[in-house]
Image (cartoon, grey):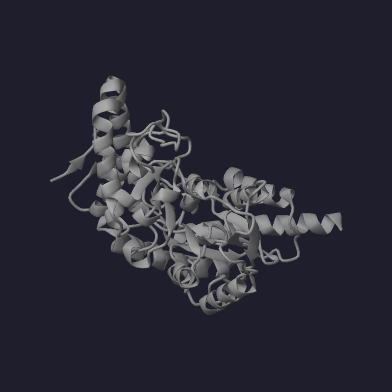
Amino acid sequence: MEIQNSTEDEGRTLPPCPPTFGKPMLKYFGLEPGYVNLNSGSYGSPPNYVLEACAKKSKEIEANPDRFMRLAYYSQLRKAREKVASLIGADVDDCVLVTNATLGVNTVLRNLQWNKDDILVFTSVTYGGVERTIKHECDLPHGPRCSSMTINFPTTKDDILSNFESHFKSLRRRQGNKIVVVIDGIVSNPGVLLPWEQMVKICKEEGFVSVVDAAHNIGQQVGINLRMTDPDFWVSNCHKWLYAKRGCAVLYVPKRNQHFIKSSIPTSWSYVSPSDPSGHSEAPNFIEQFNENGTADFAPFLSVIAALEFRDWLGGEDKINSYCHRLALAGGRKLAELLGTSVMDQDGEFTANMANVKLPMDDIPVSAATDSKIMRALFIDWNCYAAHFHHNGSWWVRCSAQIYNEISDFEYLGRALMRICEEIRTDAKKVQ
């Protein structure tokens, strides 16, 4: 049986069997012809099947907004939550949907009741928006103290875990204070898979609160089981790697911790105040608060259902991630060979579906001008993109491998970057 959407376009109709991964998959995505996308990790690239499902859902909503929002929405939202919860090994009533991982982390950190002796731990590779959130919490009049742990790549997982434990021992702990640790599941830049499960375990042993920013994990890491790993809080974007429509993320809060989440962001009608009259629903009303906390386009939340249908049609999580992982490793090596440099993760222990490759520009200092030149040249002159960044004294490029990519995409990016880096080095010599 065919799975079809509302059009007869070949890219939007799913035949019984999917084509071979690589270029044949491009017709099932909405990318413009000729664009080489090696950066799905930043914003995601939903397939046409999902886009069409969202368009159909939007028409359904707009046909009778009141009826949909008051009668139909909540049951459909629960179905989406059930699908996501099953994928990550969690109870459905421990999972709610929010617009993105940054909002999820904000929701957790802004609900925690801080005391002056509390400590909020993060790392030097914490995502910028989350790092700024942490700084904001520490800047509050009665906020916690910040404590940053440095992680520089290349390194090893053993070193990271050893330094993680050593950092905790260096903290000045006081009786009764709490220590909250923000852990990256997969770092944004560099695009590396951290041993977050082991880091959560260390936090549990130490009595610390773990907040896992797993923005890149769902759809890129197979076998996530939150019941087993048991973090205190966990959030992941569904639009980056899972093929949902932007923006959609899952926030996991186990029942033992739901009393901490007094309010969604923004605050919902279901918020329970201590001053409410007797007989009012008991706090925290966790699920109810996130069912609807302000008017928005809820089609992206419901797009999780279509996204998982599409992934099942492709062959499932193992097949998708096996292809993308192998391509990330092979593509990263090919790109490094073309550039005459190296991959960040020589042994592949940190690689999920993103490869980090050094650019031949160690003599080029960090500057907004260099950053802009790389980005504009890739977009305008070459019609391709992979995220570039500066880390540990070197320039790098992060390549996201997707099912529509092939080695030839890495080769094309290599030709572009060789030319761009050469021009940047030439311009730098003229200035000198």
Residue 341 appears anywhere in the view: yes
Q: At which x and y percent is residue 346?
A: 53, 76
Q: Nearer the viewer, residue 383 or 275?
A: 275
Check the picture and name the quadrant holding the C terminus.
bottom right
Horizontal and vertical percent position of residue 241: 40, 53
**342 sits left or right of 361 in the view:** left
Q: Please state if 35 lies on the left or on the right of 26 as rendered.
A: right
* Place of residue 385 in the rendered image (x, y in percent of width and height, measured from the top left): 54, 50
112, 391: nearer the viewer? 112
Q: Nearer the viewer, residue 58 or 127?
A: 127
- Height in image: 254 above or below 175? above
Considering every residue shown, the one lying at the far left of the view is: 1
Task: Give the image quarter of residue 424.
Answer: bottom right
Which residue is found at the position 42% from the left and 41% from the top?
246
Which residue appears at 28% of the width and 44% of the height? 80
When asked about the image quadrant of residue 407, the answer is: bottom left
Q: Would residue 244 be seen by someone viewing this image from the given angle?
A: no
